[in-house]
Image (cartoon, rainbow, N blue to C red):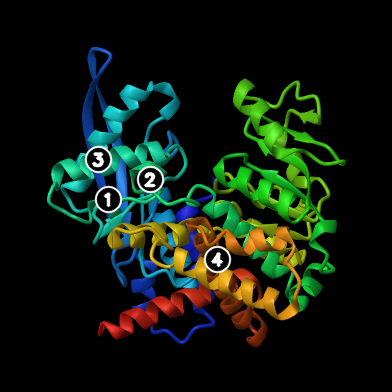
Amino acid sequence: MNNFLTDTTRYVNKALKYSGLTDGLANKIVTCNSTYTVRFGVRLRGEIFTFEGWRSVHSEHMEPTKGGIRFDLATHAEEVEALAALMSYKCAIINVPYGGSKGGLRINPYEWDEKELEKITRRFAQELIKRDLISPSMNVPAPDIGTSSREMAWIADEYRKIHPSDINGSACVTGKPISKNGLVGREEATGRGVQFIIREFFRSPELLKLAKFDNNLSSKTFILQGLGNVGFHVSKFLTEDDKVKLIGIAEHNGGIYNEEGINVEHAKKHFIRYKTFENYKKATFIKDSSLLLKRKCDILIPAARENVITEKNAGDVSANLIVEAANGPISFKGNQILNRRKIFVIPDILANGGGVAVSYFEWVKNLRHIRFGRLEKRRNQIQINNLIEAIETMTGKTMPKKFKDKFTDGIEEIDLVRSGLDDMMIDGFQNVKKEFLENEKIPDFRTAAYKTAIEKIALSYDYIGL
């Protein structure tokens, strides 16, 4: 069995070989600061059930710390610590001013109805809030596997009850519903960030050469593993905006394949309705979905969970490029095999940072108590209308309606969110790319990403006199 935490540490230690950090500082960066274990009882169905959960804080080089809460029967303390570490590194890479944290509750959320799950979530939140492990200034959760905006709304409400005088209380979690101080674009953020990273990769001739690609993204095919929130959104954006062809989707209980392409929205509706891809008429059903990881495609996007590509199947992967939309989908040994086979990998700590980037925007919005674009939208519209009027007066011609409408619509909050996300993902990508291309000793893109992250964290520690 692959140990997620051990593999994450091995990736960091590999990067440290190319860094000039002292052993003491390196050890401080690698070590998880704290992990709190909570066991609490909830009366349900006429009896008391005891649940176990965790909240890990990997690094407090910047505060608050940030990281999602997952509800999953398979989660455990070491997994939560590994995920907290990844949060530290991905925040550092894309310059989000947070430390890394993560939470987990060992539960199958589908075994409980909505009222029962709300009761469990609120009790878990109470245990964390009273220890400042949920706080707008110290520790800010978000959704993860098994949770959504619904659970975040329950947690935020529980925080409000415990701290009714905290004017910034809504910033205690991100990923909330829009109507509950959430931010438009947060749900799509991780998938959208993966799309922006892939686009930036295809603007990089030096990297395309290593992957044996031309720069025509629209001519490429991809296979997706995991049709959850992240997998669905990245597939939707790549197929609709960039015209990349989705030819396979792998889920835990089977997958589908169609060389002519798959409509991800149509496939998603079938999966939601029947909980399986079996009998899906627009593609071939493949009972053993792991076989899809071996099918020939240009880009493979693992978007489910850790350790889906290991030493057992890495030798059979046929894609030229793997983009880690999930956390830790490739084991350390699996990654070594991919490196030897010269399959290019864009690592999770860069590729799936979009969620925390837009979570940062939501947190800032909650602290500002005003939506993005509110103060400048009408002023911008007036300026644009004046500019159009001046152009029409000088040329003696009327601007075509389709262009005028685009200009005069004005900037919406979603435009600003996507623009900010694109900027942060591009900056992060370029920093890692620079490290990779300028240091010939660095063997792969993942190592360059980890080196970039740990050196930024080291700089933060240096500034606070550690």
The secondary element bearing badge 3 is classed as helix
- Above or below, 390 against 281 in this view is below
Amino acid type, callout 2: Lys
Q: Work out how far the residue at label 4 is from the one at label 2, CA to CA, in angstroms.
A: 21 Å
The front one of 338 and 383 is 383
The image position of residue 459, as x and y in percent, is 38, 83
Residue 69 horizontal/vertical position (percent): 38, 45
Query: Of the residues under marks 4 and 2, which one precedes in the sequence?
Result: 2
**Comparing labels 4 and 2, the label whose residue is closer to the camera:** 4
What amino acid is at disc 1? Answer: Ser
* Residue at figure coordinates x 33%, y 40% from the top left: 153
Residue 39 in sight? yes
**Res 323 → quadrant:** bottom right
Task: Identify the residue position indicated by label 3 in the image.
Answer: 157
- Which of these two is toward me, 55 or 116? 116
Earlier along the polypeptide chain: callout 4 or callout 1? 1
Residue at the far left: name it: 165
Labels 1 & 2 near each other (Cβ < 8 A) = yes
Write down the residue under mark 2: 176
Marks 3/4: CA–CA distance: 30 Å
Label located before the other in sequence (3 or 2): 3
Contact? badges 4 and 2 (CB < 8 Å): no
Residues at marks 3 and 2 touching, judged by CB atoms closer than 8 Å: no
**What residue is rendered at 55% in x and 66% in y?**
419
> Which amino acid type corresponds to the residue marked 3 in the rendered image?
Asp
Q: What element carries label 2?
A: loop
Q: Circle 1 sits on which residue? A: 170
Name the image quarter holding the N terminus: top right
Residue 23 image point, x, y percent: 38, 80
